[in-house]
Image: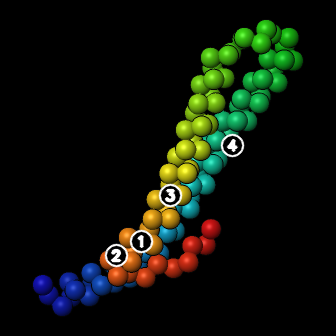
Amino acid sequence: MSIAMLKTMSHARRLLPNEIAEAFLPVERAADQTAIAGYAVMALALTKRDEAGLPLTVGEEALREVGEGCRHALEAQAAFRRAHALWPTIAAETKMFVPACPS
């Protein structure tokens, strides 16, 4: 392996922890935003159904699906947080420095 290649690998390894840590936060926030938007749709649908004087069963299946989607968004956010939390262990195993998380 050439010296240039070793320098490139060393540089990439130094940058890797920061790049990965920074990449997690927008994904976690996006999952939260999905849940927020989904619950807003649910609240709007419930309000409009009530204002229109429709039976409580109107849109029941769709509302259940929106709730399920929101639940999945929150589960996704939790999974990304768990993966984010594992990163220091991975870095320690590979002898890389991991900066403190800005979140």
What residue is at 49 percent from the left and 63 percent from the top?
84
Q: Label 2 sits on what residue type?
A: Glu
In the rendered image, which residue does mark 2 sit on? 93
Residue 63 visible in rendering: yes
- At label 4, counting other C-alpha atoms closer than 10 Å, the crowd grade (few under 14, some 14-19, many 20 or more) is some
In contact (CB < 8 Å): disc 1 and disc 3: no
Mark 4 vs mark 3, CA separation in Å: 20 Å
**First along the sequence among labels 4 and 3:** 4
In contact (CB < 8 Å): disc 4 and disc 3: no
What residue is at 77 percent from the left and 30 percent from the top?
43
Q: Nearer the viewer, mark 2 or mark 4?
A: 2
Q: Is residue 4 left or right of residue 35?
A: left
Q: Nearer the viewer, mark 4 or mark 3?
A: 3
In the rendered image, which residue does mark 4 sit on? 36
Q: Specify the farthest residue to the left.
A: 1
Mark 2 vs mark 4, CA separation in Å: 36 Å
In the rendered image, which residue does mark 1 sit on? 89
Q: Is residue 1 left or right of residue 39?
A: left
Mark 1 vs mark 3, CA separation in Å: 12 Å
Measured from the top left, where is residue 39 in percent x and y? 70, 36
In the rendered image, which residue does mark 3 sit on? 82
Q: Label 3 sits on what residue type?
A: Arg
